[in-house]
Image (tube, rainbow, N blue to C red):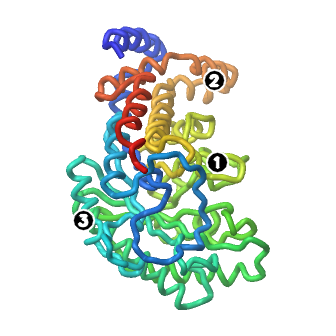
């Protein structure tokens, strides 16, 4: 986009927001400090690079679609990620699942992984000026076929997964030391039943016990930080999920562990934005997994919908940006995978920018004085303010394409690179 065509609308927008005592330059400086953690699994449909030579089975996850050009190797995945980061303004992170290690042709089981399997990722991230986050992979494995991992009544199954998560925490700490920035390790398990369970108590007691063993070892928070993630239901766990929101909320707050809220893991009528200021009264930090739920499926490509805006508004209004970590969490094999990363990241950043451009002092003044009409009216008027001009200027300032011009870049990359993959 022509520089003049970006800068002139920005000057007009800056003046318009200035009338509301909103400093657009200050808002952009704040936005520049926010990092999003992109999900590596969007690039290859959550396949990973294990060589276990067995039917993985028992996942509780389904990636739908067969759009051509998915990454088949680590180098292809890194190339695709590099293109995505090139089109996203700001400085961001990468979230890895344990199955994405560099295992070569070696058959390495989940309870055998070690930091050496991720040194390539650490070196690559340093070259790209990226930071890494990490996730245990407690699904897509024969020892998850029963539907239970850390809460299994089979002691041997529990021990296998306990060891896996312990090693994932060790790897996370190693990453944090190497990158000199805390690596967030997030734990999600698929445990639950398709129909009604007669023994919910026992499974939750076992999960509590397993977590107690896993978190016995303490790591310096400058190296790694733990998070636990709940779910409302999943495929094969429609009636009972062991790690429910209530379970992990109680566990996280009582153990001083970070809670992870996934936007697609709650009832459609629940407001995740409303939960933020409640949880942060009792917890120092919060991890948000940004996804989009559509009917039963929780992991659609993120767009700038009302739920996303509700979340970004609440974080900014509650002045908790430094206590909240933003990560994308979705997988969609029905569209261009690189484009999906970019759509989602830019949508989240737009939501944050819109929130940063609110005249919060004026709105609070109306609210505190009981002038709810004026509060409502101003919030409505803000919906047509020229935040788009501010966004385009930010993209230009950060050296990435503004407006819709980035779409051509994705299509060019597809024609030159991903379309040639068999």
Q: For numbered disc 2, what is the local secondary structure? A: helix
Q: For numbered disc 3, what is the local secondary structure? A: helix
Q: Nearer the viewer, mark 3 or mark 2?
A: 3
- Left or right? Give the position of 112 relative to 373: left
- Left or right? Give the position of 294 relative to 168: right
Q: Residue at x 37, y 78 (%)?
A: 107
- Which disc is residue 375 wearing? 2
- Tell me how far mark 3 sits from mark 1, CA to CA: 34 Å
Of residues 316 and 244, the one nearer the viewer is 244
Find residue 292 and report its horizontal and vertical position in percent.
60, 45
Q: Residue at x 28, y 62 (%)?
A: 176
Q: Earlier in the sequence, mark 1 or mark 2?
A: 1
| Residue 189 appears anywhere in the view | yes
Among the 4 quarters of the image, the one containing residue 167? bottom left
Where 369 falls versus 329 (above or below)? above
Q: Are marks 1 and 2 in contact (CB under 8 Å)?
A: no
Where 80 falls versus 3 (above or below)? below
Q: Which residue is the site of mark 1? A: 293
Q: Mark 1 packing: few (<14 Cα in 10 Å), some, or many (20+)? A: many
Q: For numbered disc 1, what is the local secondary structure? A: strand
Find residue 78 and report its horizontal and vertical position in percent.
32, 51
Find residue 411 and report its horizontal and vertical position in percent.
42, 32
Find residue 284 and report its horizontal and vertical position in percent.
45, 57
Query: Residue pushed farthest bottom?
Result: 155
| Residue 316 appears anywhere in the view | no
Q: Nearer the viewer, mark 1 or mark 2?
A: 1
- Which disc is residue 119 wearing? 3
- Which disc is residue 302 wearing? none
């Amino acid at each position: 986009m022509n520089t003049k065509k970006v800068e002139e609308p920005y000057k007009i927008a800056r003046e318009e927001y200035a009338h509301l005592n909103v400093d657009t330059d200050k808002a952009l400086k704040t936005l520049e400090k926010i990092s999003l953690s992109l999900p590596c699994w969007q690039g290859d449909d959550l396949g990973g690079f294990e060589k276990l030579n067995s039917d993985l089975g028992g996942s509780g996850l389904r990636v739908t679609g067969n759009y051509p050009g998915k990454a088949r190797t680590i180098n292809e995945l890194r190339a695709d990620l590099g293109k995505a980061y090139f089109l996203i303004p700001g400085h961001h992170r990468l979230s890895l699942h344990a199955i994405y290690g560099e295992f070569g042709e070696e058959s390495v089981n989940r309870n055998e992984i070690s930091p050496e399997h991720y040194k390539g990722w650490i070196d690559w991230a340093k070259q790209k000026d990226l930071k890494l986050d990490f996730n245990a992979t407690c699904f897509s494995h024969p020892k998850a076929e029963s539907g239970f991992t850390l809460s299994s009544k089979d002691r041997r199954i529990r021990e296998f997964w306990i060891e896996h998560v312990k090693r994932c925490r060790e790897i996370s700490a190693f990453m944090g030391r190497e990158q000199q920035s805390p690596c967030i390790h997030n734990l999600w398990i698929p445990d639950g039943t398709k129909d009604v369970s007669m023994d919910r108590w026992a499974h939750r007691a076992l999960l509590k016990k397993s977590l107690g063993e896993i978190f016995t070892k303490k790591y310096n928070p400058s190296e790694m930080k733990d998070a636990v993630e709940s779910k409302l239901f999943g495929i094969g766990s429609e009636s009972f999920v062991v790690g429910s929101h209530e379970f992990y909320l109680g566990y996280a707050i009582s153990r001083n562990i970070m809670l992870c809220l996934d936007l697609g893991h709650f009832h459609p009528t629940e407001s995740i934005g409303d939960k933020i200021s409640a949880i942060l009264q009792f917890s120092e930090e919060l991890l948000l997994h940004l996804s989009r739920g559509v009917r039963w499926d929780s992991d659609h490509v993120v767009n700038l919908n009302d739920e996303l805006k509700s979340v970004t508004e609440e974080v900014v209004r509650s002045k908790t940006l430094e206590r909240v970590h933003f990560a994308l969490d979705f997988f969609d094999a029905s569209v261009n995978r690189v484009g999906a990363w970019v759509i989602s990241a830019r949508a989240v950043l737009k939501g944050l920018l819109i929130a940063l451009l609110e005249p919060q002092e004026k709105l609070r003044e109306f609210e505190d004085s009981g002038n709810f009409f004026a509060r409502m009216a101003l919030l409505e008027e803000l919906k047509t303010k020229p935040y788009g001009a501010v966004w385009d200027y930010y993209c230009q300032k950060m050296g990435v394409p503004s407006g819709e011009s980035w779409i051509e870049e994705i299509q060019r990359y597809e024609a030159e690179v991903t379309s040639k993959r068999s």
